[in-house]
Image (cartoon, grey):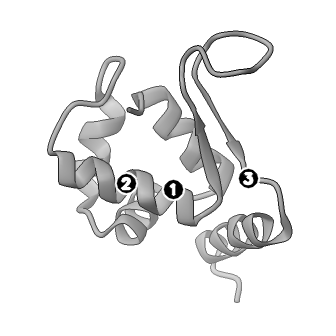
Amino acid sequence: MITAAQLRAARALLGLDQRQLAELAGLSAPTIQRMEASDGLIRGNVDSLMKLTAALDRAGVELIAEGAASQSDGRGVRLKAGDAARALAAEAGAAQEGRP
């Protein structure tokens, strides 16, 4: 499960706008907008949620569940360790800025 706050934070980590994330996930921009406007946990079509979380995972984002091992018990996001995840995040940011 993912919250709207986690989705916004993940998108910010990757430097993507809503349209770019929608393209990565195979969803529409209005779907991403609705998800981000949700209160708390995102509810909706299971297939859309699976596409979204898979796209974030491919892009190098790790979703931290509530109660997971961390300094606090809250939910969160972070970039996965490793050069591939950093490269994907940098590439996504460059695409947003129109750089090759």
> In which quadrant is the N terminus drawn?
top left
Residue occupied by mark 1? 56
Please say if the residues under marks 2 and 1 sit with CB atoms less than 8 Å apart: yes
Task: Give the amino acid type for the residue marked by disc 3 in the picture.
Answer: Lys
Disc 2 designates what residue? 52
Residue reaching furthest to the left: 45
Distance Cα–Cα, label 2 vs label 1? 6 Å
Residue at left 31%, top 18%?
39
Q: Quadrant of residue 73?
A: top right
Which element carries disc 1, helix, strand or loop?
helix
From mark 3 to mark 2, how far is it between C-alphas? 17 Å
The quadrant of the image that shows the C terminus is bottom right
Tag 2: Cα neighbours inside 10 Å, few (<14), some, or many (≥20)?
many
Side of 27 relative to 71 (left or right): left
Q: Earlier in the sequence, mark 3 or mark 2?
A: 2
Residue beneath the point at 73% across and 65% down: 85
Residue 9 drawn at (x, y percent): 58, 37
